[in-house]
Image: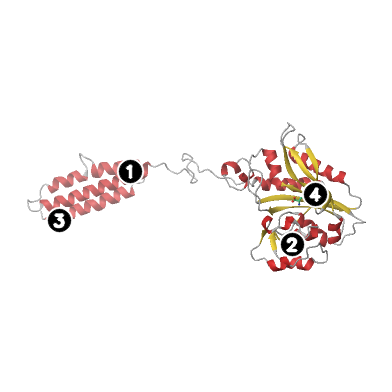
Amino acid sequence: MSSGSLIDQIDAFERTALAAVQSAPDAAALEAVRIEFLGARNGRLRDLQTVLGKATKEEKPVVGKRFNEVKQRVTAEYETKQRALSRPKRAAGGLDVTLPGVRVEQGRRHPLTQTILEFKEIMGRFGFTVADGPEVEDEWHNFQALNIPADHPARDPLDNFFLATANYAARQSTASELNLTAQPAAVTGPRLLRSQTSTVQIRVMESNPPPVRIISVGRVYRPDTIDATHSCMFHQMEGLLIAEGTTMAQLKTVLRLFARAYLGHDVTIRFRPSFFPFTEPSVEVDMSWDNTGTKWLEIGGAGMVDPNVLKAVGYDPDKVTGFAFGLGIERFCMRRYRVPDIRYFTNNDLRFLRQF
Ligand code: PHE
């Protein structure tokens, strides 16, 4: 027998064996293939080896090498196929219930967003509608119309975030005395990130006649030193009610009812006389942190709208009066959920956020 025909026989074996291995549909069929081709006793590989025993001395190295190659290739192919067939099969419908599941991450609203939605809902029950205003403001709406004249310390550039593009020359030329007719300069002059939502009071009154009953919720910015209860950006809810015969008693009642609606009946609200340029009289509002009566947290300011503010927007202070308040939203949320540090709201730690 020539070495050529021996090699042909080996090649033929390789082709049939590989085809049989690859087409075996399941483990039982593959086992039958193994016995037929690779079986130690009567397998075709065995037979082939017997035939090769007839090779001449010269043929042996070539033929033996090829035989070993084929033997290894078919065996390797068989093992690969066996591993593939022993993997868990997909159940009908494509779902393998034995595989470990993939956890589905469920998103949720940020705690502050949840708080804001609830605030709007509570105030809606009191008849307040929601108004909006820009976060980048002019000096008219952030200061001047709110009875904060140009030389007032609250307007110090170090206490506000003025925009770098702001025209400081225009700012310097603003009359140092409160000039209610100076609206255009203050509107076209420097811009800043609003330091309070009271800006929206002005915007609403400028474009609506009385009566007014609105809240406005949003971000405010102050270059405060950041600590557990202060941040350079936080959220306020502004409230404004303008009508005939509004009283301070109504203001206090609205704030008490609101605090109880959000925090429950164990919260105590206290009012301290204070000063804001845009309200007279003014109060600062605190809430009890717990039931010991010793720890209080300031939640905002409030008061009866100053007549100068009413005049600035073209209202007649002899006809209508009103009250306004500005509350810190983070602090309410902190009190309800016992959040010890305001920074948790913005550092995006999922361990914190997942609790809401
Ligand atoms: N704008 C005040 C502040 O941010 C709060 C306030 C609002 C006070 C309305 C009185 C009336 O501190």
**Which of the two labelled residues, at mark 2 and mark 1, occupies the earlier sequence position?**
1
Mark 3 lies on residue: 5
Name which residue type carries label 4.
Answer: Phe
Task: Report the front residue among 320 and 56.
Answer: 320
Q: Within the image, what quadrant is residue 250 found in?
A: top right
Asked if the residue at tag 1 contacts the one at tag 4, i.e. Cβ–Cβ closer than 8 Å, the answer is: no
Query: Distance from label 3 to label 1 (Cα)?
Result: 32 Å
Q: Residue furthest left?
A: 57
Q: Is residue 308 above or below residue 127?
A: below
Looking at this view, is 219 or 52 the one in front?
219
Cα separation between marks 2 and 3: 100 Å
Q: Quadrant of the C terminus?
A: top right
Q: Amino acid at mark 3?
A: Ser
Q: Residue at x 67, y 48 (%)?
A: 113
Q: Which mark is residue 275?
A: 4
Amino acid type, residue under disc 1 in the picture: Gln
Q: Quadrant of residue 185?
A: bottom right
Using the image, determine if residue 170 lies above or below residue 156.
Answer: below
Q: Position of residue 109 (x, y in %)?
A: 64, 47
Q: Residue at x 61, y 40 (%)?
A: 355
Q: Which comes before the other along the chain, label 2 or label 3?
A: 3
Q: Identity of the amino acid at label 2?
A: Glu
Q: Is residue 261 left or right of residue 64?
A: right
- Which residue position holds label 2? 139
What residue is disc 1 on? 82
